[in-house]
Amino acid sequence: MGCTYKYLNGGPGAPAFIYVADKHKDTARPALSGWMGHEAPFAFDLDFRAAPGIERMRVGTPPIIALSILEASLDIWDMVEMDAVRERSIELCDLFIDEVERLCPQLQLGSPREGKCRGSQVSFHFENGYAAMQALIANGVIGDFRAPDMMRFGFTPLYTDHDDVRGAAAILGTIINDKVWDDPKYQKKVKSYMIKPYDPSDEGAQMSFDGRMSYGDYLQIDTILNTQQPLSTAHDEMLFIIQHQTSELWMKLAVHELHAARAAMQENRLEPAFKMLARVARIFEQLNNAWDVLRTMTPSEYTEFRETLGQSSGFQSYQYRQIEYILGNRNKSMLKPHAHREDIHALLKQELEMPSLYDVALQLVRANGVDIPTAILERDVRDTHQADDGVEAAWAKIYNAPEKYWVLYQLAEKLVDFEDYFRRWRFNHVTTVERIIGFKRGTGGTGGVSYLRRMLDVELFPELWHVRTQL
Ligand code: HEM
């Protein structure tokens, strides 16, 4: 499809045309089916049946006057060779480039310099191109402007000659060198040229924050973004730091949610607790996805800064330990790396004094009419809960009658769901670690992968997993 506006310099309103290869003309479907392209236009059928051959492509009433002018202009082509026209077009454009570069060196050529790579037009960059083009138009040289700074000139080799080109370049030279464009009347933009960047303040966005609390103030972004301090020049150390810091932020939210979930369960407000547990599971899903970013670091890249880490390791993450303690994995020897920080040590010890999330879940089971052994309910909560047949029997009862124990059944699934994500985190961690350091010792001093593999066996809510075998 083409337009004679573009291809034949027809200007606005010039007819369009379509070309269909001979072999397709009886089968091609017109994109727009028009009355004039109907097989039987005067049958006034409701359905469209394409006329045979190229006639089917007629979509509207032909603009007769425009077509007659077009036809006359096409006659010229019987008198000239296309190669000659092309040669002339290149010549005129070359001349224009030479003239403009000579007269206005401040304009920068935007089109290819090599003639055969251009169409029949030439563009120049000029920062005040819009106003300069208005001045040119006012002086009889009609080009066009494309934002942000492009002045575009078309050459019609059939009727433009060298003098026209030199004349246009001279007028342009005067406009640029005498700064004619600087007249306010040429600066005023008409709307089609106003390719204005989107400005959110147009729809009320607050753009001035002098004396008002901004995003950065509220979130203390400066503080957060100033805490990435690599100790080496290794490119990947930034990734390593941010990966850990973002994990710690998500863990902070997990602690916040788990505390609230436990409190809600203690008050028998199960719906909000379920919602919070679901959120914690999603947080772990997020942490699981984060491994994909860290995995892009190769052993060679890690080796570049490993030394700078000294003995530091995620093993000493107190929030991770706190999460484990909240859930019920209460290995007290994990307190030791925090002995030097009284506040953190106290926080973890305080956590051990509280019943774990699982302890509270088992209390709820009892409160909702399913027996749990008293020894379990009265156990020393500072220790890790050990799998118990009586507890497994309780869960079996619930799983065997979900409708009767719907709330407990839901609770069980929320806990399993969460532990499922937690396990995946551990698995992703150990796999990433193996990928990066193989079986080397960890910076924290453990056997590394061997230690982490042992941790894969940890069961936070053991009976909830064991019960599945008997269902
Ligand atoms: C290059 C990446 C990493 C490597 C090579 C790595 C290596 C290790 C190793 C070897 C251990 C065992 C303790 C030790 O001897 O150091 C460990 C523990 C740990 N790492 Fe990573 N780790 C990496 C990334 C992460 C990230 C991004 C986190 C997120 C916070 C993280 C959190 C932990 C935690 C919480 C532990 C203790 C696990 C437990 O005690 O069960 N690690 N890591």
Image (cartoon, grey):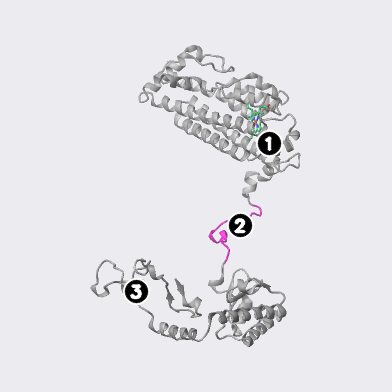
- Between tags 2 and 3, which lies in front? 3
Residue 369 lies within the magenta run: no
Crowdedness near tag 1: few (<14), some (14–19) or many (≥20) residues, C-alpha within 10 Å? some
Q: Amino acid at mark 1?
A: Pro
Residue 197 lies within the magenta run: yes
- Between tags 1 and 2, which lies in front? 1
Front residue (pair 247, 198): 247
Q: Specify start and end residues of the magenta stretch as a single range.
A: 196-211
State whether residue 120 is above or below residue 429: below
Tell me the CA gap for discs 1 and 3: 69 Å
Label 1 sits on a secondary structure element that is helix
Whether pointer 2 and pointer 3 mark residues with C-beta atoms closer than 8 Å, the reply is no
Residue beneath the point at 71% across and 74% down = 106
> Can you identify the residue that label 2 sits on?
207
Q: Is residue 78 left or right of residue 441?
A: left
- Numbered mark located on residue 299 in the image: 1
Dot 1 beta carbon under 8 Å from ligand 1: no
Residue 30 appears in the figure: yes
> Can you identify the residue that label 3 sits on?
55
Residue furthest to the front in view is 23
Q: Position of residue 268 (x, y in %)?
A: 46, 26
Lower sequence index among marks 2 and 3? 3
| Main SS category, magenta section | loop
Whether pointer 1 and pointer 3 mark residues with C-beta atoms closer than 8 Å, the reply is no
